Image (cartoon, coloured by chain):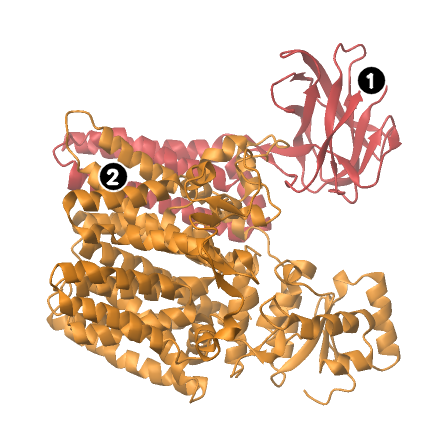
Chain colours: A red, B orange
């Protein structure tokens, strides 16, 4: 009986702990995405002189920027980059400058580089994203661009001049928040998905619970109650997996 | 337009009634059987088959309302009898301590089915349910019989109409719209189908195998999860989870070899699920008849009717099930069970004949074989299956060179569906080792279904034969369950390799479902129409006009590909389904496209009185938020010369409907 009580308490602690972690630990949520049908092509080489930029609108506040970067040097060569956000185009007032981020030459086509901003930037039209490439880098640097006018209001710039209308820089805006902080945003924008997500998570928990119970009662009745201690955390981790994924909508 | 909460309950009750009636019939057909898992599974599937046949047959001689009332009156009597008998002699659930787990899994599967169906209507997760099946049901509800084709209104549409007809009957009797009725019909059919599989495999093997078979049917799919590391998506995101989102659950669940998870079949065409439910009922009954469980003569009669109902909803199930029943003959004759052999062959023959009673493609082919000239038989493609190579989409397995067919044993088939091949061959091996031919039944029927596309060719829609492959994949799941349970129980030595293999096989079959399950909320993320309220208000307006009204949509589709798209917020689908409009645009290759396509395109371009009059157009239904400058100019000119007069503007102004001046109707 004592073992069973211990198992129940451990399970309860696991559930509460996992959900506290899910609800409270902040993660980076993508606010924009490119679909596979957009054609991607390398943009560059870019440099301190041929500086790439992009006009864009932010529909939500953001505090992280991500961009695919390709360093054309031997495997492992690295370059430190900055981004800067200005108002109203090249030469506009600087809103914020990101902390430096290192781009490395990898085996993949691009490396997604995260640029963390020191403050949250408000939603607004007419931002200009600018990349600072250090002078005298040893390796050619490429960013990625996308054809198909993914952002009709946006515009790709090279060396301070606007590029083709149908092309945009590949980049992603992200927001670092916990699930608890993010829930009101989802509820406001996407209620159906939240309802389905919550329903799914509850059902997965129910299945985890009934599966453990059935296993213990039906097939493994000769095994000690402490087995639940071993089975509950993986089952609940599986449930948390669904919880974590459903919110990446 | 979106159903009231109580309508979900009333439609669910109305859709479940035939299943309850079927269970009562099954009690009578299987007098010594008291297991709810078996009697319920046999009966609910039979109920679905009988109701689709009953309505489809009766509607030829009486109005739909009378047909629906007649069939449901009989169902109600049988359901009342079931309840009365249950009090004296209840059926036994016999699930032991597994009942909560089974209940929770069933709840999850039905939840997924509901979400998928909703997504197919409001969120453009495939287009066939809303565009064709619910569209036809809505027109039936409006009194469209003989069924004029909504997209070719001068021709009849007798094409897999059993499920829409049942949906319309449910809607008619419960006073609900086709969305709620379609959802209920789908949920009940899925339950009946899975229950039927469970019953059949329980009778063939045992309860645990039956439960695993039903579970695998619901979750098994292509092994696309293995290809995720190679998938050419997700390069441009910082979130690894978003890579999955980018691929999308629908893409994950469809194979390169044409065939998809059961979960994706629901939003694609719920008519096939209705047919499968009936097929599962007949299949389970056939297994019961093969043993000493059933009253043969009565089972023959009831089974024939359900067999015919299955064919009305999904005619391509007929050759698969009929061949399967014929295959049992030598087995029964060899065992000296002549009456079983005669009953099962009789069931297939009588069912096929009854399938000719309702109007439909089968009746049409029987009356004039020349009308089936688009079908041809040859053996040049034997042992091949159709692939996604016919569509301009890359495979998740990038090493594949696109080609329209793949050999059954080709590497790409193994990559996508190794569990199918192992399940079929493995369960056949188990049957041989144990000397029980019945254990090979799912494998044999699955193999037949997989091989049909290698001999039957549809010249009009070359990839249409994929539906046989799909049935083959679904039948491979019970075969896999038989193999998996046999491996799990295999004791030899101290190593548990057999258990490991069994677990691995289940993982191969269910891996993609598990991965894509977390993406389910994404399928209801974005409404297809950002102006849904305007869309439905406009549809409600035209739905209350005298039926039928012919409309021209501006902008609107002109080709079959555009029909199956979200063009102009998907306005054409909502207008035709919820607005009950006929649009004389021409449909697919099988229909009378050439009769309408050019005239409709001309009328769309010029909006001239003569072009509109030639097609008998009453209304011009416009999406103001999608009109090109040229279309707006043409519209203004038509208004200026008095060809059109505005009759309706939606609250947000994005939908405006005009009446053609020369038209007298409405």
Q: Is residue A243 above or below residue A190?
A: above
Q: Secondary structure at mark 2?
A: helix
Give me the residue at 55% from left, 65% from top: B130
Could you classify mark 2 by the number of other residues whose Cα lies within 10 Å: few (under 14), some (14-19), or many (20 or more)?
some
Q: Quadrant of the N terminus of chain B?
A: bottom right
Q: Quadrant of the C terminus of chain B?
A: bottom right
Residue B106: image location, x then y, percent = 32, 53
Q: Which-is-in-front pick, marks 1 and 2?
A: 1
Is B409 displayed left or right of A181 in the figure?
left
Is B595 displayed left or right of B504 in the figure?
right
Is B153 displayed left or right of B100 in the figure?
right
Is B5 displayed left or right of B652 in the figure?
left
Q: Is residue B491 above or below residue B58?
A: above
Give me the residue at 60% from left, 78% from top: B543
- The residue tagged 2 is A212
Residue B293: image location, x then y, percent = 13, 65
Q: Which mark sits nearer the N-terminus, 1 or 2?
A: 1
Pinpoint the chain carrying mark 2.
A
Q: Quadrant of residue B374?
A: bottom right
Return the residue nearer the eye: B639 or A98: B639
Q: Quadrant of residue B635?
A: bottom right
Q: Which mark is residue A48?
A: 1
Q: Secondary structure at mark 1?
A: loop
Q: Is residue B13 visible?
A: no
Residue B443: image location, x then y, percent = 29, 50
């Amino acid at each position: 009986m004592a073992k069973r009580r211990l198992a129940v308490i451990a399970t309860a602690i696991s559930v509460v702990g996992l959900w506290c972690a899910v609800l409270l630990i902040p993660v980076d949520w993508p606010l924009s995405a490119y679909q596979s049908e957009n054609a991607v092509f390398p943009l560059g080489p870019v440099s301190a002189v041929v500086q790439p930029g992009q006009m864009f609108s932010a529909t939500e506040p953001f505090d992280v920027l991500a961009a695919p970067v390709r360093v054309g040097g031997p495997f492992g060569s690295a370059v430190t980059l900055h981004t800067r956000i200005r108002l109203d185009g090249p030469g506009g007032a600087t809103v914020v400058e990101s902390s430096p981020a290192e781009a490395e030459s990898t085996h993949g086509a691009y490396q997604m580089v995260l640029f963390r901003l020191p403050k949250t930037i408000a939603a607004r039209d007419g931002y200009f994203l600018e990349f600072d490439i250090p002078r005298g880098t040893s390796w050619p640097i490429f960013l990625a661009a996308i054809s198909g006018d993914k952002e009709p209001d946006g515009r790709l710039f090279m060396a301070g001049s606007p590029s083709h209308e149908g092309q945009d820089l590949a980049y992603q805006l992200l927001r670092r928040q916990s699930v608890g902080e993010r829930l009101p945003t989802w509820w406001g924008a996407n209620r159906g998905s939240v309802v389905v997500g919550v329903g799914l998570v509850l059902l997965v928990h129910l299945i985890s619970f009934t599966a453990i119970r059935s296993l213990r009662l039906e097939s493994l009745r000769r095994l000690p109650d402490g087995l639940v201690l071993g089975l509950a955390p993986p089952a609940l981790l599986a449930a948390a997996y669904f919880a974590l994924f459903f919110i990446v909508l | 337009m979106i159903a009231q909460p109580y309508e979900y309950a009333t439609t669910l009750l109305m859709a479940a009634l035939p299943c309850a009636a079927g269970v009562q019939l099954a009690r009578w057909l299987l007098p010594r059987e008291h297991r709810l898992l078996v009697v319920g599974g046999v009966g609910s599937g039979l109920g679905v088959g009988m109701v689709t046949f009953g309505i489809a047959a009766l509607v030829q001689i009486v109005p739909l309302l009378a047909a629906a009332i007649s069939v449901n009156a009989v169902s109600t009597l049988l359901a009342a009898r079931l309840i009365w008998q249950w009090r004296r002699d209840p059926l036994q659930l016999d699930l032991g301590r597994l009942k909560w787990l089974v209940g929770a899994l069933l709840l999850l599967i039905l939840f997924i089915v509901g979400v998928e169906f909703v997504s197919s209507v409001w969120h453009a997760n495939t287009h066939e349910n809303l565009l064709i099946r619910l569209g036809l049901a809505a027109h039936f509800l409006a009194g469209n019989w003989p069924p004029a084709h909504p997209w070719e209104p001068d021709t009849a549409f007798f094409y897999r109409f059993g499920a829409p007809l049942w949906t319309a009957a449910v809607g008619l009797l419960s006073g609900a719209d086709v969305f709620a009725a379609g959802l209920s019909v789908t949920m009940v059919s899925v339950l009946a189908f899975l229950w039927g599989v469970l019953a059949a495999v329980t009778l063939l093997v045992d309860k645990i195998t039956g439960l695993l078979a039903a579970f695998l049917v619901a979750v098994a799919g292509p092994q696309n999860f293995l290809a995720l590391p190679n998938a050419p998506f997700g390069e441009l995101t910082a979130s690894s989870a978003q890579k999955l989102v980018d691929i999308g659950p629908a893409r994950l669940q469809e194979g390169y070899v044409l065939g998809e998870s059961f979960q994706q079949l629901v939003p694609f065409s719920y008519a096939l699920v209705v047919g499968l439910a009936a097929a599962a009922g007949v299949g389970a009954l056939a297994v019961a008849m093969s043993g000493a469980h059933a009253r043969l003569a009565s089972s023959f009669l009831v089974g024939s009717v359900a067999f015919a109902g299955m064919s009305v909803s999904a005619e391509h199930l007929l050759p698969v099930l009929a061949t399967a029943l014929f295959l049992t003959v030598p087995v029964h004759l060899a065992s000296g069970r002549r009456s079983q052999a005669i009953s099962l062959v009789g069931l297939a023959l009588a069912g096929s004949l009854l399938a000719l009673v309702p109007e439909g493609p089968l009746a049409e082919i029987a009356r004039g074989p020349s009308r089936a000239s688009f079908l041809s038989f040859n053996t040049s493609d034997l042992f091949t299956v159709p692939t996604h190579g016919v569509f301009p989409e890359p495979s998740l397995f990038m090493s594949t060179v696109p080609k329209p067919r793949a050999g059954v044993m080709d590497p790409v088939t193994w990559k996508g569906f190794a569990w199918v091949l192992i399940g079929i061959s493995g369960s056949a091996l188990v049957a041989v080792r144990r000397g029980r031919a019945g254990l090979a039944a799912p494998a044999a029927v699955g193999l037949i279904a997989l091989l049909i596309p290698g001999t039957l060719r549809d010249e009009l829609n070359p990839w249409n034969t994929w539906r046989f492959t799909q049935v083959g994949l679904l039948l491979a799941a019970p075969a896999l369950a038989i193999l998996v349970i046999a491996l799990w129980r295999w004791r030899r030595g101290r190593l548990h390799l057999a258990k490991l293999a069994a677990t691995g096989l289940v993982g191969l079959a269910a891996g993609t479902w598990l991965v894509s399950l977390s993406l389910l909320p994404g399928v209801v993320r974005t409404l297809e129409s950002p102006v849904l309220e305007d869309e439905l208000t406009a549809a409600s307006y035209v739905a209350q006009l005298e039926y039928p009204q012919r409309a021209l949509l501006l902008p609107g589709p002109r080709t079959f590909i555009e029909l199956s798209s979200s063009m102009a917020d998907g306005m054409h689908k909502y207008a035709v389904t919820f607005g009950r409009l006929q649009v004389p645009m021409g449909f697919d290759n099988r229909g009378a496209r050439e009769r309408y396509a050019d005239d409709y395109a001309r009328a769309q371009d010029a909006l001239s009185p003569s072009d509109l009059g030639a097609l008998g157009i009453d209304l011009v239904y416009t999406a103001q938020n999608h009109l090109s400058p040229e279309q707006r100019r043409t519209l203004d000119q038509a208004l200026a010369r008095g060809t059109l007069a505005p009759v309706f503007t939606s609250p947000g102004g994005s939908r405006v409907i005009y009446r053609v001046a020369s038209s007298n109707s409405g």
